[in-house]
Amino acid sequence: MSVTEDDVRRIARLARIAEPTDRVAKLTGELNGILDWVEMLNEVDVDGVEPMTTPVSTPLPMREDKVTDGEIPEKVLKNAPKAEEGFFVVPKSVE
């Protein structure tokens, strides 16, 4: 796969990037180099290799799934600019 100078101009226009015309040829060569490198990755034998999301094995911190801060609505609403009947009152944003 390769890109032409017309492709580069079109991509720049779609990305709303003002690319000077004297740089289009150089950018085309750079993009084609990147695409060639990506195609080389298809030659790597990955049979039997499990997919991974990160090369670093980090366990996620877990916490017990329980409610810990309930039954204190007065304390929760203490700093609210305005509250009514145990709820925050906010300005209407949608008519």
Image (cartoon, rainbow, N blue to C red):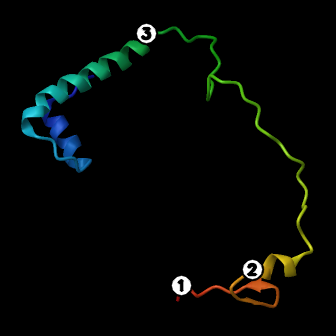
Pointers 2 and 3 in contact (C-beta within 8 Å): no
Q: Quadrant of the N terminus?
A: top left
Residue 79 circle label: 2
Q: Type of residue at label 3?
A: Glu
* Disc with the residue nearer the chain's start (1 vs 2): 2
The secondary structure type at the circle numbered 2 is helix
SS at mark 1 in the image:
loop
Q: Position of residue 93 (x, y in %)?
A: 54, 84
Give residue 47's position: percent from left, percent from top. Answer: 59, 10
Residue corresponding to mark 3: 43
92 vs 61, left or right, is left
* Point 18% across, 42% down: residue: 10
Mark 1 and mark 2: Cα distance apart in space: 24 Å
Element at label 3: loop
> In front here: 76 or 70?
76
Q: Alpha carbon of mark 2 to alpha carbon of mark 3: how far?
A: 61 Å
Q: Earlier in the sequence, mark 2 or mark 3?
A: 3
Q: Nearer the viewer, mark 2 or mark 3?
A: 2
Judging by the rendered image, the residue that carries numbered circle 1 is 94
Quick one: label 3, few (<14), some, or many (20+) residues within 10 Å? few
Q: Is residue 8 left or right of residue 50?
A: left
Q: Amino acid at mark 2?
A: Asn
Q: Position of residue 95 (x, y in %)?
A: 52, 89
Label 2 neighbour load within 10 Å: few <14, some 14-19, many 20+? few
Residues packed near mark 1 inside 10 Å, few (<14), some (14 to 19) or many (20 plus): few
Residue 49 drawn above or below residue 31: above
Which tag, 1 or 3, sits closer to the chain's start? 3
Left or right: 2, with 22 as reference point? right
